[in-house]
Amino acid sequence: MTQQAPAAAQEYPPPGLLTVVREWGRIGCIGFGGPPTHIALLRALCVERRHWLDAREFEDAVAACNLLPGPASTQLAIFCAWRVRGRLGALAGGAAFIVPGLILILALAVLFIAGSPPSWVRGAGAGAGAAVAAVAVQAGSSLIPASWRRAHAAGRLRWPVYVAAGGAATATVGPWLVLVLVACGGAELAAARLRRTGAKAPAVAPVPLLAAAGIGGGVLASLCWVAVKVGALSYGGGFVIVPLMQADAVARYHWMTGGQFLNAVALGQVTPGPVVQTVAVVGYAAAGIGGGILAAVIAFAPSFAFVLLGGRQFDRLRGDQRARAFLDGAGPAAIGAILGSAIPLALAITQPWQYAVLAGAAILLLALRRGVVATLLCAGAAGLIVAIAGGPLPR
């Protein structure tokens, strides 16, 4: 017997599983553009067209998902499916949302990460990859206004320190960046407790830069650990996973070259579904198709667990002062990490013409406010032209 979602006022009866699979699968197929697109499509489906959720419940769910680590729009898709069809609906809807983009990104990974892809493929990948650093700057800068407004007066004194700590961690501790994000969240949580008890909080809370030993046990064990960090320990969502993966995939384990990693990030941006699916390309580079699927399953498993085990608490999470205080520290650090990731991404460029593509992408994204997908397609087209003209391509 199928377990149903908790009782709540619904204008229409809950959908069948086939309906959930069809509707969530459709969003997974057309959800180009990242979380803003996913949220808009889910709202149009669940609130405006089908009336399965009311507007306030949906907004509370968006806020709660943003307080959790991992891909917020994926967690929102799983929560909405759980809300309308119970646990079985969450599993079916979440899978339908993720799988279309996963299939596409693995197919493109085979094309772009193959041992000897044709020159036109290498050119298109090199062009799109060259624009990724500009995408990182755009992604980070777009988060600054909301984060600054959310910070309280005393917290604004610490806010730049958290941003700087996240940026510095990108260049120093690499794959253990997440520990810096957690440390910043913990520092702000401690400051919030001091305020509540009436003690004097320091103007700048200590932000320890932590490091730890790596995990051994071969390629699959290392890949599993990378996927765990991506799926369960990344705050800020989206682009904050880039420095988490780059240090491991390129510098530490040598699964990919810098150029191939740029291609992986670009593929994560131009395919539908969450950006976290970039980890599937890293998994493919490490251990083939099986490695790509394994990395994706591990990276998305925490999102399912958060909803299946804690979905009933989502309405309370939004008002939890401790969760919000933690995010007030971890959030700015994540912004700093996203902005800082532009530096190693830009350093991975090897051909002079790629810097021209990067400059053009920066103009399109930051000055002309063009979309990420359109910008990456333009950059890929520029690389294609260079390849056809016989220009130099990254190895």
Image (cartoon, helix red, strand yellow):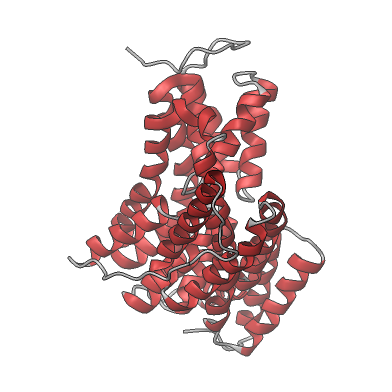
- Residue 57, given in percent of the width and then of the height, sits at 61, 25
Compared to residue 123, the image places residue 221 above or below, namely: above
Q: Quadrant of residue 30?
A: top right
- Residue ID at (45%, 55%): 186
**Residue at image point 67% right, 59% down:** 156
Relative vertical location of residue 281 with respect to residue 61 in this rendering, above or below: below
Left or right relative to 262: residue 114 = left
The part of the image, by quadrant, that contains residue 54 is top right
Image-quadrant location for residue 106: bottom left
Expressed as whole percent of the image width and height from the top left, the position of residue 161 reads: 59, 68
Q: Quadrant of the N terminus?
A: top left
Left or right relative to 62: residue 311: left
Residue furthest left as drawn: 217
Rendered residue at 70%/83% (across/down): 356
Identify which residue, 366 or 352, lies in the foreground: 366
Q: Residue at x 49, y 73 (%)?
A: 170
- The image shows residue 121 at horizontal and vertical percentages of 53, 71
**Residue 192 seen by the camera:** yes
